Image (spheres, helix red, strand yellow):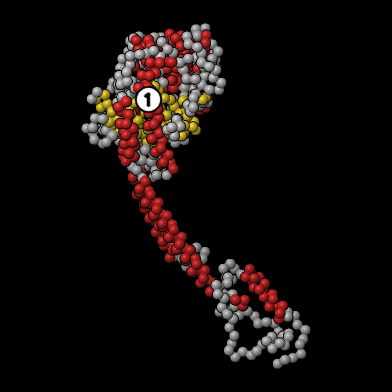
């Protein structure tokens, strides 16, 4: 029925059609999230088969009523929108697919982690055997150069205290208990004593040597005790002065020169060039320091080292023999040999008559006169304890330790503190590619090359000895092998730390594991509980159980999705 058009608030048909998309967007924005999304192919509007033509299609202009309200629950909503039920079904399917994909990815990741853990985890015995094999290969490669004995010990953040030893002497197999000369590592003991005396007020590090010794050594009058400990003087090294102390010692090994005589011989040489901000290695400084300490305390340095260093750290196999003693090593003892580099250095200072491969059994004891300059002896286990203490840092105050670690360059890349060598954030030797911040001290005496080092970066310590002189670079090579293993394990973390294996029996087991092999030995140190926790082998069980439980939860979650998408 058509009636006369009345005034109406309805919009013109053309304008309503134009505004319809805007109305649809507003409507969707007001609905809850997920309930008003377009489906990929919007359903077409349906029309009843016998519906009458609309007024709009008849071209009759305006209508006298508002448009029909939006159908509720219809399968064909206005503006081509899917119904709430359709939207929920689509969202549920998508959520299920996402959950299943996520679960599959996590399960694959857990599986890969488990496989990596099973493959990468080494027990203490496995790691010990592998490192022992690497060390032994290096030892065998240079054995013809008259290295007949080598011992290595480490304090590892994962595997605790471990030790290896190889070789022997004249048919006798080397043992873990063999004594050897530590050389200039003795200086770190003497410095530790002096620094503790300074903490007690007995000594003043800023006071000159002349204040304590008067005019006995005029060249030292303007140098402070701290400068002596830090190798910051221009005094020549007594070991480098030609036709002097070393030559006399080789001519008559039984002679025992006094510290004063050795210093006077060194001062006969010209002073070293100005140092600037660097240091210059000179054993003479530590001989003067020892005289100073003994006069200030009225006690022999031997007793002071025992009281201030050896006893507090439990170094029962380390000693400083009296300067007038025979100087022979305690039994069982390693035998010192002369390597090719050692022979060349001896010839430079006038000590002729020594050939490569000669034993230095008679010459080595004469070093006892140098005392804390280079005359101490130890074992590989005690040397590791000294390395773990930071070459004495553990028995010093934090303020003293900080002052001790003020390093000065002493020839790249070596640096020197107060009785402490360091290689902070540089390299031992560019050819060996050994980065890191190790500190401690090295030793090179007549027949032995040694090293005792600690790294706070790796939380590790390292000790090594070989029975030939002038072989320090070889000891650094051995340390490089250990550091490379440390770096690999830090870059690719393995399970938690292991408990060290029991200590070796009285008769040491060789590196290859056969107790009858005479050429070498290997063992973990005395039982200790290393930093890091439980044994790696025993830790695999809980790790595997936890991984399997997590994988089961992830698999169940893929089928646990219900009608809601909130999960």
Q: Secondary structure at mark 1?
A: loop
- In this rendering, would 529 be left or right of 508? right
Question: In the figure, 425 relative to 275: above or below?
Answer: below
Work out whether residue 322 can be spotted: no
Please count the marks in the image. Answer: 1
Q: Is residue 182 left or right of residue 49?
A: left
Q: Position of residue 135 (x, y in %)?
A: 33, 33
Q: Toward the viewer: 496 or 327?
A: 327
Percent across and percent down for residue 511 are: 28, 34
- Residue lying farthest to the bottom in this orientation: 1
Residue 202 in the image: above or below residue 13: above
| Residue that appears at 43% across and 65% down | 559
Residue placed most toward the observer, 142 or 7 = 142
In the figure, residue 137 lies in which quadrant?
top left
Q: Nearer the viewer, residue 483 or 368?
A: 483
10 Å neighbourhood of mark 1: few (<14), some, or many (≥20)?
A: many
Name which residue lies at 23% across and 25% down.
171
Residue located beneath label 1 in the image: 471
């Amino acid at each position: 029925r058509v009636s006369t058009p009345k005034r109406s608030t309805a919009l013109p048909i053309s304008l309503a059609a134009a505004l319809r998309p805007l109305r649809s967007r507003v409507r969707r924005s007001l609905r809850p999230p997920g309930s008003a999304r377009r489906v990929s192919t919007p359903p077409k509007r349906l029309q009843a088969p016998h519906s009458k033509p609309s007024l709009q299609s008849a071209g009759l202009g305006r209508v006298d009523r508002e448009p029909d309200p939006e159908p509720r629950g219809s399968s064909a909503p206005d503006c081509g929108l899917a119904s709430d039920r359709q939207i929920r079904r689509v969202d549920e399917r998508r959520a299920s697919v996402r959950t299943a994909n996520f679960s599959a990815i996590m399960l694959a990741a857990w599986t890969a982690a488990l496989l990596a853990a099973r493959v990468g985890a080494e027990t203490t015995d496995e790691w010990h055997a592998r490192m022992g094999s690497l060390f032994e290969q290096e030892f065998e490669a240079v054995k013809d150069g008259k290295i007949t004995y080598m011992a290595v010990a480490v304090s590892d953040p994962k595997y605790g205290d471990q030790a290896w030893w190889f070789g022997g002497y004249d048919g006798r197999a080397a043992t873990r208990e063999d004594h050897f000369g530590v050389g200039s590592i003795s200086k770190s003991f003497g410095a530790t004593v002096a620094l503790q005396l300074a903490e007690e007020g007995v000594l003043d590090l800023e006071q000159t040597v002349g204040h304590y010794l008067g005019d006995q050594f005029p060249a030292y009058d303007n140098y402070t005790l701290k400068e002596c400990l830090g190798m910051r003087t221009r005094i020549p090294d007594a070991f480098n002065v030609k036709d002097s102390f070393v030559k006399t010692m080789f001519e008559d090994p039984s002679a025992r020169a006094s510290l004063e005589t050795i210093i006077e011989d060194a001062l006969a040489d010209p002073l070293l060039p100005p140092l600037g901000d660097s240091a210059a290695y000179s054993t003479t400084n530590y001989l003067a320091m020892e005289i100073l300490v003994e006069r200030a305390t009225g006690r022999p340095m031997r007793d002071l080292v025992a009281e201030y260093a050896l006893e507090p750290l439990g170094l029962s196999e380390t000693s400083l023999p009296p300067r007038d003693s025979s100087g022979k090593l305690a039994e069982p003892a390693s035998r010192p040999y002369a390597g090719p580099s050692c022979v060349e250095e001896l010839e430079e200072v006038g000590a002729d008559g020594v050939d490569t491969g000669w034993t230095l059994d008679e010459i080595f004891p004469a070093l006892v006169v140098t005392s804390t300059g280079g005359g101490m002896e130890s074992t590989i286990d005690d040397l590791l304890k000294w390395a773990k203490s930071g070459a004495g840092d553990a028995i010093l105050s934090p303020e003293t330790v900080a002052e001790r670690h003020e390093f000065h360059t002493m020839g790249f890349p070596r640096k020197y503190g107060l009785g402490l060598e360091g290689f902070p954030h540089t390299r031992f030797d560019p050819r060996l590619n050994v980065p890191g911040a190790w500190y401690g001290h090295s030793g090179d005496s007549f027949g032995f090359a040694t090293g005792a080092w600690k790294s706070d970066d790796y939380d590790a310590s390292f000790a090594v000895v070989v029975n030939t002189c002038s072989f320090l670079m070889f000891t650094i090579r051995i340390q490089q092998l250990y550091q490379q293993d440390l770096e690999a394990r830090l870059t690719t973390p393995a399970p938690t730390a292991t408990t060290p294996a029991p200590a070796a029996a009285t008769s040491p087991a060789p590196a290859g594991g056969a107790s009858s092999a005479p050429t070498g030995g290997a063992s973990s140190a005395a039982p200790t509980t290393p930093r890091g926790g439980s044994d790696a082998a025993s830790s695999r069980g809980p790790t595997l159980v936890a991984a399997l439980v997590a994988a089961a939860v992830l698999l169940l979650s893929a089928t646990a999705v219900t009608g809601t998408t909130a999960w």
